[in-house]
Amino acid sequence: MGIHTSHPDVVKRLKRAEGHLRSVIAMIEEGRACVDIAQQLQAVESAISNAKTTLIHDHIDHCLEQSLRNEEQSPTSAIKELKSITKYL
């Protein structure tokens, strides 16, 4: 499929998650408070969740819609694909 318009945003979100995760590892190694570590883990989880949602919505908005519009995919096949990808939301 190539690069989608949302991919730079997804990469930015994943890099943010990567930075938070590095912070979590350092915090654990330093013996920081569990509450602080949990807060950083929540930030990692949120960044990854947002990246995933952005990617899935982009796929629905562009790939599925375009394949239906161009008649590259049957409506039944598109619905099956939609159900398949939305299980990750």
Image (cartoon, rainbow, N blue to C red):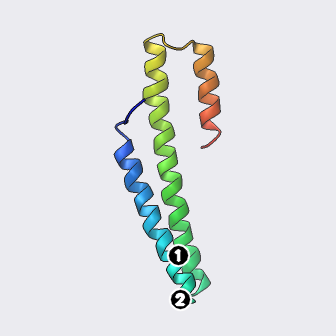
Residue nearest the observer in this picture, 42 or 17: 17
Q: Amino acid at mark 2?
A: Glu
Counting residues from the start of the chain, the first of labels 1 and 2 encountered is 1
Determine which of the numbered discs, if any, sits on residue 81 in the image.
Answer: none
Q: Is residue 57 above or below residue 15?
A: above
Task: Estimate the spatial distance between the alpha carbons at disc 1 and disc 2, rounded to whole Å.
Answer: 10 Å
Residue nearest the observer in this picture, 3 or 64: 3
Residue nearest the observer in this picture, 3 or 70: 3
Q: Position of residue 80 (x, y in %)?
A: 64, 23
Q: Residue at x 46, y 44 (%)?
A: 54
Q: Position of residue 48 (x, y in %)?
A: 51, 56
User: Seen from this angle, which residue lies furthest front?
Assistant: 2
Q: Is residue 9 above or below residue 79?
A: below
Q: Is residue 31 above or below residue 77?
A: below
Q: Position of residue 46 (x, y in %)?
A: 52, 59
Q: Residue at x 42, y 28 (%)?
A: 62
Q: What secondary structure is found at the residue carrying circle 2?
A: helix
Q: Left or right: 3 with respect to 80?
A: left
Q: Residue at x 37, y 35 (%)?
A: 4
Please report contact status of discs 1 and 2: CB closer than 8 Å, yes or no.
Answer: no
Q: Amino acid at mark 1?
A: Val
Q: Position of residue 42 (x, y in %)?
A: 55, 67
- Residue at which label 1 appears: 24
Q: Residue at x 41, y 60 (%)?
A: 15
Q: What secondary structure is found at the residue carrying circle 1?
A: helix
User: Seen from this angle, which residue lies furthest bottom?
Assistant: 31
Quadrant location of the C terminus?
Answer: top right
Q: Residues within 10 Å of mark 2 (few under 14, many from 20)?
A: few
Q: How many marks?
A: 2
Determine which of the numbered discs, if any, sits on residue 30 in the image.
Answer: 2
Q: Residues within 10 Å of mark 1 (few under 14, many from 20)?
A: many
